[in-house]
Image: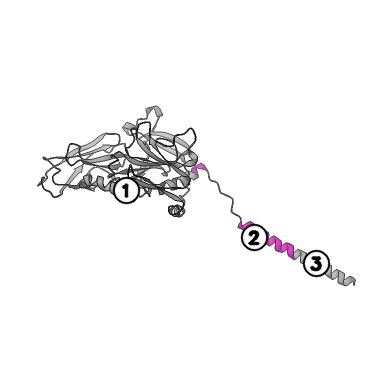
Amino acid sequence: MLKNEQGNAVALTLLGLSAAILAGVVVLYYLGKKTPEPVYVTPKAAEEEVKEQDKTEGEQGLQEGWNTYVNNTYGFTMEYPDGWMVATGTLRTGDPVITFTPATQITATSSPVYSHQDVANHVSVYPQGVATEGIASKSKPSEVVLPLSYATTLDYTLTSNRPWATKVSFSAFPTSWNESGFVFARAVVEEEKLTYMRGDTEIEQYEFDAMTGDLIARTGLIDVNIRNLEEEMLETFQFTNTEIEEQTTDVKHIILEEPLAGTVIVSPQTVKGTIPGGWYYGEEYPITLQTDEGEVLAELFATGFEEWDSEQSIPFEVSLVFENPTATSGVLTIGDDNEDGGKLVIPVQFDNK
């Protein structure tokens, strides 16, 4: 009888140990399945090394959970995500603006519309432009692509070359717009530090003069999620067909083959294209290159046209010679307001390295 009791005790002990071991294995398994702790990086690493998130989720959001905004007054549409709001109004300059911004950013004391100079997360549309200075910051051609062949995108970048804002300009637009109209997307730069530069030389803030080509170098951090959303919103911007067709009937006949809008140009720069017959009178047709600040770099006249009164398009080609400016961007103008055919204005970039 004693042997049986001892045997039962041993069996129960072994059974208990087996159960404990099994329970430990299960616990370790589920501990291994836990979400790993987040890894934090230093501000410098966050600025220079963190890669843009995969946009697959954002692209899916355009189909589900996003909203479409339609503006009949200014003839455009754009999609925006849930959690963002749309506000319309005018700036202190009197210019109209349509602003898309995270709803959480708006407070009882803040304005729901923003200028391109306001430090806020937003995508804003300025159909008449803004009667104030532009962004005097390091910039580069953007990889953001709009579904419009006549749209040009320019990124404003941190010293790490990461974009914190994007400007979209247009060479054709609805009749309710003007040639100064643009779209601007801006992400807040946290821990921002500004350095004022004249060429490669750092200067004091009181010496800074954007009109002479001085630039502001920025360092800091941006919210990658906000920046991705803003880029995706820009890529949905479109003019409504009826509006843009009405406007382009007046300007589409001036065809510029070289340079393309938004490209980097260097001296000597070939400028060629076609001018519609019947628009050219006399022996000259003006071509002007200037910086965004209004400094004229080159001005000449295309000459030697044959059959200028023909109904057919007239080709032209000239070589534009100019000194490379300290400014990073400017405009090339074909024709002028005195010509019956009007003018074509396209944005260009300068290689000022």
The quadrant of the rendering that contains the C terminus is top left
- Nearer-N-terminus badge (1/2): 2
Label 3 close to label 1 by CB (< 8 Å) = no
Categorize mark 2 by other alpha carbons within 10 Å: few (<14), some (14-19), many (20+). Answer: few
Q: Which residue is mark 1?
A: 240
Q: Which residue matches tag 2?
A: 29
Please tell me which residue is depicted at 19% across the width and 44% down the height of the picture.
Answer: 319
- Which residue type carries mark 1? Thr
Q: What label sits on residue 12 in the rendered view? A: 3
Question: What span is colored magenta in the figure?
Answer: 18-44
Rendered-image quadrant of the N terminus: bottom right
Using the rendered view, name the quadrant where residue 29 is placed.
bottom right
Q: Amino acid at mark 2?
A: Tyr
Disc 3: CA contacts within 10 A as few (<14), some (14-19) or many (>=20): few
Question: 48 left or right of 8?
Answer: left
Q: Position of residue 347 (x, y in %)?
A: 29, 42
For the residues labelled 1 and 2, the Cα–Cα distance comes to 57 Å
* SS type, badge 3: helix
Q: Residues within 10 Å of mark 1 (few under 14, many from 20)?
A: some
Residue 134 visible in the snapshot:
no
| Nearer-the-camera pick, 67 or 159 | 67
The residue under the point 30% across, 34% down is 293
> Residue 73 location, x and y as percent?
33, 42
